[in-house]
Amino acid sequence: MDPSERFSLRSRGLRASEIRALFAVAARPGVVSLAGGMPAADALPSQVLARILGEVAAEPGALQYATGQGAPGLREMICGVMAEEGIAAHPDDVVVTTGAQQALDLVTVVLADPGDVVLAESPAYVGALATFSAHGVQVRHVPDDGAGLSGPAIAEAVDGVRRSGRRVAFLYTVPNFGNPSGVTLSAARRAEVLATCDRIGLQVVEDNPYGLLRLEGEPLAALRAAHPGVVYLGSFSKILAPGLRVGWALAPAEVTAKVVLAAEAAMLCHSGLAQVAVARYLADEPWIDHVKALRELYWERRQTMVSALSALMPRGTRWQVPEGGFFLWLALPDGVRAKAMLPRAIQEGVAYVPGTGFFADGNGDDHLRVSYSYPEPDAITIGVRRLARVVKEAAEP
Ligand code: PMP
């Protein structure tokens, strides 16, 4: 059979992620990986979860098919988690999903057609770009002025797309500690973005997996807290454990109903076992204390990385210190190309993600992403030392 006849047109949008390819290389012995965005090994409450999972597995119904929308008890607890972000939500408007990633996938199915355009930050989360591409949805990056999204930049981007005759399905944004930018949108910018989107009739999809991992400064209310029309995505991956694959979407009732139908069509239901375990964890364990301990752990790692960068990186390398989350976004000295430099970095024993992974339009080769979440502090310092050597060599060949 002719391969071009076998595959759907949409399958052309399924592309290997730069990060996935890197995981294999970064896992080689001796390589310090600053590439992945995994939680610290110490951050996962393994013993507690092992006990809870064992207990709930033995309960009636726990191993049966679950509901498409998610366990009511968990949806109620999720509203309690969102209250920490200033959001007042009703459990009926929550859909539990297999990670925030699936929430984004389902929301994309429900809100965007192939050929539509989604607006995203510059740079944008690589997993979101993969989802949009898989659904034949194009991405238009909104120019960043160093402080994230702005009303005028959004309005201009939407105008450009609409003038070309295409539909803008929604704005996708990570307002807290962006992945990879580390940027947090200020309160004033949040208000400006919401006012602009309201005025031009643009749906906002807010992705907030890192919101509770603020390492310094005052918490800012989520966009959804100020506007009930915002579709909000949350996750237990960073505050509990990614292996549970439990996330959620909070959306206006009519969107929620469609997301539930899309979830049922894709997979009947999510893991009921994981949902009941998370609900039990939230109900019985001091989960907010665990989050506070995580803030301390990541604060130390971020400090280690920032000190090492300040001490070691060659002139011309620039970064902003993120107020939370897992990532730092490094602007490289003039002429240094992140992708071309990577094989040399791996040879020297350090891995990072080239900035090109975070743009749908080929930009970003003058940046790279490093993460402090997974490596131990000593490894962070060693990794940054190796990276600094490689950047210096590339800047002054
Ligand atoms: N959104 C962002 C911005 C992320 O960084 C990630 C995880 N890397 C996700 C969504 C997906 O998270 P989950 O594990 O809940 O699917």
Image (spheres, rainbow, N blue to C red):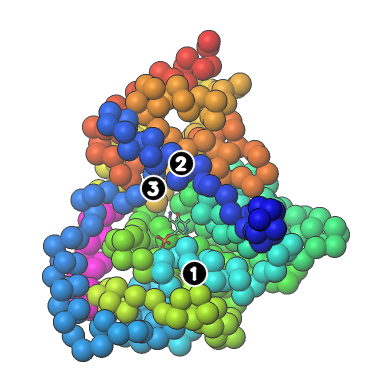
Question: Which span is picked out in magenta?
Answer: 280-295
Q: Secondary structure at mark 2?
A: helix
Residue at mark 1: C-beta within 8 A of ligand 1: yes
> Which amino acid lies under the numbered mark 3 shown in the image of this protein?
Gly
Q: Is residue 329 above or below residue 258?
A: above
Q: Residue at x 64, y 38 (%)?
A: 363
Q: Which residue is mark 3?
A: 37
Sort mark 2 into few (<14), some (14-19) or many (20+) by Cα contacts within 10 Å: few
Residue 152 location, x and y as percent? 73, 55
> Which amino acid lies under the numbered mark 1 shown in the image of this protein?
Ala
Residue at mark 3: C-beta within 8 A of ligand 1: yes
Tell me whether the residue at label 3 lies in contact with that at label 2, contact meaning CB atoms closer than 8 angstroms.
Answer: no
Would you say 341 lies left or right of 156 here? Answer: left
Sort mark 1 into few (<14), some (14-19) or many (20+) by Cα contacts within 10 Å: many
Cα gap from disc 2 to disc 1, whole angstroms? 24 Å
Q: Nearer the viewer, mark 2 or mark 1?
A: 2
> Which amino acid lies under the numbered mark 2 shown in the image of this protein?
Ala
Q: Nearer the viewer, mark 3 or mark 2?
A: 2
Residue 27 location, x and y as percent? 32, 38
Cα gap from disc 3 to disc 1, whole angstroms? 19 Å
Instruction: Decide which of tag 3 and tag 2 comes sooner along the chain.
Output: 2
Quadrant for residue 213, please give it: bottom left
Q: Which of 204 and 59 lies nearest the eye of the viewer? A: 59
Q: Which residue is mark 2?
A: 21
Q: Residue at x 49, y 81 (%)?
A: 264
Q: Is residue 307 above or below residue 17?
A: above
Q: Secondary structure at mark 3?
A: loop
Q: Secondary structure at mark 1?
A: helix
